Amino acid sequence: MDVAALLRAKGHGVVVIDPERSVADAVALLEQYDIGALIVSPDRLTVTGIISERDVVRRLARDGPACLADSVGAVATADVTTCGPDELADRVMVTMTEGRFRHMPVVDGGQLVGLISIGDVVKHRVAELEQTNSHLETYIAGVPR
């Protein structure tokens, strides 16, 4: 399965925050939408960063609560790994696991089209394995389809 199919299943909605907004604003959005990361973008189309719960916690540990007034752009991860809609979900899962991050923006033609999480990919993979298992059990039991 490719990333486009994952996005069709989960939707293309992405919560975006302007890099000039405060970290406190980012925390409020993370809580409001019950999500783990926000895409940082000045125009809702280009990805200039990603800010995750991990980024906020690390900055809090280093600088204390005063960091909540900092701009999102100052705290966010700027070197963002992205994928395209035509990439295979299994390859994206490997990239996320090896890179030790849980969210990957999907970019097509230089524009943000979605966001997938490791949970999205794992959910898909588990469903695939369950379907394969069911087919094998049916085959072994000799039950015609």
Image: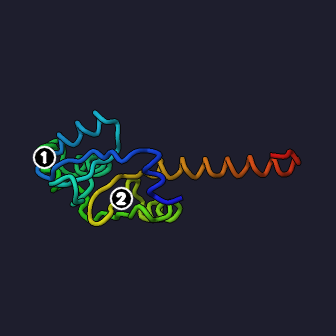
Q: Mark 1 points at which residue?
A: 21
Where is residue 98? Give x, y as percent.
Answer: 46, 65
Q: What element carries label 1?
A: loop
* On-image quarter of the N terminus: bottom right
The type of residue carrying mark 2 is Val
- Residue 141 position, x and y percent, is 87, 46
Q: Name the image colouring.
A: rainbow
| Residue at 86 percent of width and 51 percent of height | 140
Indicate left or right for 80 with 44 as reference.
right
Q: Of 105 and 86, which appears nearest the observer?
A: 86
Q: Which of marks 1 and 2 is nearer the N terminus?
A: 1
The residue lying furthest to the top in this view is 32
The secondary structure type at the circle numbered 2 is strand
Three-letter residue code for mark 1: Arg
- Using a 10 Å C-alpha cutoff, classify the residue at mark 1 as few (fewer than 14 neighbours), some (14 to 19) or many (20 or more): some
Judging by the rendered image, the residue that carries numbered circle 2 is: 106
Considering only vertical position in the picture, is 50 above or below 69? below
Residue 27 in the image: state x and y as whole percent.
Answer: 24, 40
130 horizontally vs 30: left or right: right
- Which residue is painted at 39% across and 57% down in the image? 101
Query: Residue lying furthest right in this view?
Result: 142
Q: Which of marks 1 and 2 is in front?
A: 2
Residue 81 sits in quarter: bottom left
Residue drawn 21% across and 43% down? 26
Give the class, few, some or many, for how many residues have Cα within 10 Å of label 2's Cα (few <14, many ≥20).
Answer: many
Marking on residue 119? none
Tell me which residue sits at (33%, 63%) in the image. Answer: 108
Residue 93 rendering spot, x and y as whole percentages = 49, 60
